[in-house]
Image (cartoon, rainbow, N blue to C red):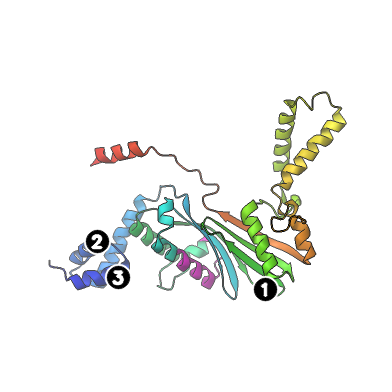
Amino acid sequence: MAVDAKLIKELREITQAGMMDCKKALEATNNNVQDAIVWLRENGLAKAAKKADRIAAEGVTFAKENDEAAVIFEVNSETDYVAQNAAFLALIDEVANTLLAAKASTLEEALAAKTSKGETIADTLISATATIGEKIELRRLVLINKEAGKTITLYNHANKRVSVLLSFEGAIEASDAYNVAMHVAAMAPRYKTMDEIPADFKEAEFSIIKAEAADDEKLKGKPENILDGILKGKLSKRLSEISLADQQFVVDESFKVGAFIESKKAKLVEMVRYEVGEGIEKVVSDFASEVAAQVAGN
């Protein structure tokens, strides 16, 4: 069946699918554009399903706010190249706007939220997977509602790989809050204060320090009480490196971050820092072997 070039153009503009895919869809549906959209989606589902077991460890993090809330999230792709693609970045903004409009606070709520085009985020990501050709997935998010007496600030690093969302109680200036967010992005604290650090983490770190001390010639022969004080000092120093309140403030080194926030008569309530791919075990592949396998399969 002959396919009208105008219909191919129309279908392509609606779906962003490839020209040949649009042609096939129209051939399969007797030139019915609406049926062709469904055909592409069904076939896109099939293509995306093949990519479901792939590891997506690249992508972007993003934080955005509106008058009522702020959200931070991570969307993953398989390669960094795709993460810089204009269509992918447009998708990120669409996801951000949808999450804020829906006030989605869980991954389940987020995936079910409907975009401005009437599709759920889940379906939108499946379509993106089929169109872009890589596994695209929403990995995690945190949404904070704005309330009276609270200051929310966010920071997105220029490389789109690190984002921060902070919530303060008190009258901290927006510029000071933003500087703290930049510090969090740069120094990557894991906890707001030392009190938040789990006991089992502290015990594990102390065991490592003791093992290191056993091989330190300078510490051998020291009285037990003195050695214990030295080891506890080393532990405190190590824990301070991951506690925001105890880090030296990069914007003003005359302060530790906790003291700086206190000087502004404020309290940090929530701290979220996302970095692309953290915690995901990446697969190191042999490119030559992959190409050979694909050639052999053809």
Q: Is residue 95 inside the magenta stretch?
A: yes
Which residue is situated farthest in the left direction here? Answer: 1
Q: Identify the residue at horizontal 43%, vertical 73% (top origin).
A: 116
Q: Earlier in the sequence, mark 2 or mark 1?
A: 2
Q: Which residues are magenta?
A: 92-107
- Give the distance between the C-alpha atoms of the residues marked 2 and 1, in whole angstroms: 48 Å
Q: Is residue 158 inside the magenta stretch?
A: no
Residue 115: x and y in percent read 44, 70
Question: Is there any visible trace of residue 136 in the rendered image?
Answer: no
Left or right of 149? Residue 294 is left
Say above or below: 55 vs 84.
above
Query: Is there CB contact under 8 Å for labels 2 and 1?
Result: no
Left or right of 293? Residue 6 is left
- Main SS, magenta region, reads helix
Question: Is there any visible trace of residue 124 in the rendered image?
Answer: yes
Query: In the rendered image, which residue does mark 2 sit on?
Result: 21
Q: Earlier in the sequence, mark 2 or mark 3?
A: 3
The quadrant holding residue 239 is top right
Q: Which mark is residue 13?
A: 3
- Tell me the amino acid under the disc marked 2: Asp
Dividing the image into 4 quarters, which one contains the C terminus?
top left
Query: In the rendered image, which residue does mark 1 sit on?
Result: 147
Residue 138: x and y in percent read 48, 58
SS for callout 2: helix
Residue 212: x and y in percent read 71, 30
Question: Which tag is nearer the camera, tag 3 or tag 1?
Answer: 3
